[in-house]
């Protein structure tokens, strides 16, 4: 089955977390997660959203699961963000519920880095089963950098699309 990527700005209520396996206790008790989320929230308040969330419309129903950017999603919810949110959307051929005013995006990591991530991505993999896009400036808030690898929770992971 062929897949393609589009760019669109989505409303916050169209997005839901791809981390449904995490419990409420994880969010309340994980200090590195809370610290990271608070840094992201402060950055969004001061600078807006710098990079698009990576999402998938897995049920073709105009609601999108966030695959990369779940901490940003939580921060946006806490900020009660009122603006549309830039998203790279991984789609299946034949989907009918595509957002209005979308832009087709080539599956070229260099072009995505240039057009959406100010020229550089730390990691980018786009194929039939994966969309892994990691920005270059996550070192400012990534718990692996802040706390060291041995204390890092599962925050940035390989994203296996469930389609």
Image: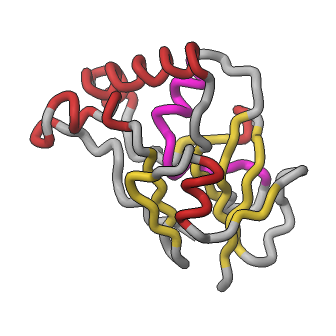
Q: Where is 58 relative to 67, above or below?
A: below
* For residue 24, side relative to residue 110 (left or right): left
* For residue 70, side relative to residue 51 (left or right): left
Q: Which residues are magenta?
A: 62-78
Q: Image quadrant for the C terminus?
A: bottom right
Residue at image point 21% right, 28% down: 146
Which colouring convention does the figure follow? secondary structure
Is residue 74 part of the magenta span, yes or no? yes
Residue at image point 46% right, 45% down: 20
Residue at image point 40% right, 37% down: 137
Q: Where is 9 relative to 57, above or below?
A: above
* For residue 29, side relative to residue 125 (left or right): left
Q: Position of residue 4 (x, y in %)?
A: 69, 71
Outermost residue, left direction? Answer: 150
* For residue 65, side relative to residue 143 (left or right): right
**Between 117 and 126, which is closer to the camera in this rendering?**
117
Q: Position of residue 6 (x, y in %)?
A: 73, 60
Is residue 57 part of the magenta span, yes or no? no
Q: Position of residue 36 (x, y in %)?
A: 35, 25
Q: Image quadrant for the N terminus?
A: bottom right
Residue at image point 46% right, 67% down: 125
Q: Where is 88 relative to 53, above or below?
A: below
**Between 97 and 72, which is closer to the camera in this rendering?**
72
User: How many circles with numbers are drawn on the protein?
Assistant: 0
């Amino acid at each position: 089955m062929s897949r393609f990527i589009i760019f669109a700005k989505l409303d916050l209520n169209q997005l839901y977390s791809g981390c449904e396996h995490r419990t409420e206790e994880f969010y309340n008790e994980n200090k590195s997660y809370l610290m990271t989320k608070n840094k992201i929230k402060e950055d969004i308040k001061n600078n807006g959203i710098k990079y698009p969330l990576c999402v998938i419309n897995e049920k073709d129903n105009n609601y999108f699961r966030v695959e990369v950017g779940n901490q940003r999603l939580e921060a946006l919810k806490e900020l009660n963000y009122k603006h549309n949110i830039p998203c790279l959307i991984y789609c299946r051929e034949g989907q009918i519920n595509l957002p209005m005013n979308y832009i087709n995006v080539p599956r070229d990591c260099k072009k995505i880095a240039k057009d959406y991530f100010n020229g550089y991505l730390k990691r980018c993999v786009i194929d039939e089963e994966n969309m892994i896009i990691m920005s270059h400036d996550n070192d400012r808030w990534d718990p692996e950098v802040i706390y060291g690898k041995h204390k890092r929770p599962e925050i940035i992971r390989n994203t296996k699309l469930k389609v």
